[in-house]
Image: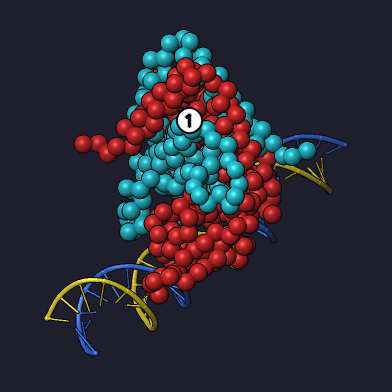
Chain colours: A cyan, B red, C yellow, D blue
Amino acid sequence: MSRVEEKRKSDSPVEPASLAPAISANTGGVALPDSGLIGAQLREILTLSTAFERHLGRALSVNDTDLAAMEHLISHGPLSPSELARHLTISTAATTIVIDRLVAVGHAHREAHPHDRRKIVVVPTPASVRATFEALMPLIGGVASVTNELSAEDRRTVTDFLASVVGVYRRALEPPV
Amino acid sequence: MSRVEEKRKSDSPVEPASLAPAISANTGGVALPDSGLIGAQLREILTLSTAFERHLGRALSVNDTDLAAMEHLISHGPLSPSELARHLTISTAATTIVIDRLVAVGHAHREAHPHDRRKIVVVPTPASVRATFEALMPLIGGVASVTNELSAEDRRTVTDFLASVVGVYRRALEPPV
DNA sequence: TGAGATAGCTAAACGATCTAGCAATCAATC
DNA sequence: GATTGATTGCTAGATCGTTTAGCTATCTCA
């Protein structure tokens, strides 16, 4: 592992711009709306999520693209390379190489398509699925736990708020008309 | 813009594994805790955040690393290349080239360090700072708006919940003892 | 049966990182 | 003031993961 890789192990990843960088004097004169602690918390969750993805990648010995491929295979079930390429938004050539890597480390294998001899099917291995969920369990279990501690009323408050945040993102991503 | 790039414009990015892939029959026999709608909403926020980062990168004509560099420069103020390298967890060689790219498109410039002639200082340009905040405003403003609509009680509920989620991530990222 | 499209792959090119190493500079010590 | 060790930022070549271009095999449709 390179020196930079060793260092990354202990660092928080960069905080994403979305939900804005921590506001500093350097806004270039732009007055910014303020979300207070909640804005800071949402930013921190995004930062921690990125760190967790990297942790997961290391635990499973895969890079970011290969991890994304595994996530698709686990959530959708076996996929053809062209379907996987579409999900990952990379070319089919790159997808071939992603699949090569996943096969090489035991995360997936190729099978012939039952009716279309042009196609193959990429299947996640049982061991990979188990290892992935095992690595995810602290997070999934923790979020389930803190969610299930909420009263019905508090759950509705949180759900309504998160729905509003989703709406903000969706509108921010709409092309201007 | 390549065909794959054109396609990415319209796609949602891959859903991150953290907060778990959408649970499917393919859990390999692993029983998973369930966070219901709140879990799905948190996943969607992470996915939308990634999409927004990409949107921001396109709006500002920078790749992911360059965007991260800009975020650091805006939130911390001018930085030396070695400081920037540490923030980005890339080598100083790679950082030199990131700075080259930012300078080339008008996002930053290099200045001499006032007291240490080994060092330079990377300064974001006013135009870049303005453009960045302008691109961020729909998100920042939207989140501020939905946050400020909460009653004091609801705000506390949301803040407590988000603090719990942050705690879950932190514990999930702790090395095992 | 032939034409057009799809699938998955290979090869070469490209972009962004890496490591190794360099010259200039700084601070501490003698 | 000279020397030594460390730091800074850069260059050059190597590596990795993607791209585009193009290929053969296969499928569907008229």
What is the crowding at mark 1: few (fewer than 14 residues within 10 Å), some, or many (at least 20)?
A: many
Residue drawn at (69%, 50%) of the image: B3
Mark 1 belongs to chain? A
Q: Amino acid at mark 1?
A: Ile
Residue D27 in the image: state x and y as whole percent. 70, 37
**Horizontal side, residue C30 vs residue A148: left or right:** left
- At 45% from the left and 60% from the top, the residue drawn is B79
Residue highlighted by disc 1: A38
SS for dot 1: helix
Q: Residue A80 is drawn in which quadrant?
A: top right
**Residue A32's spot in the image, x, y percent?**
58, 41
* Residue at screen point 54% across, 21% down: B150
Q: Is residue B39 above or below residue D7?
A: above
Question: Which quadrant of the figure contains the N terminus of chain B?
Answer: bottom right
- Find residue D20 and report its horizontal and vertical position in percent: 67, 58
Observer able to see residue B166? yes
Nearest the viewer among A4 and A38 is A38
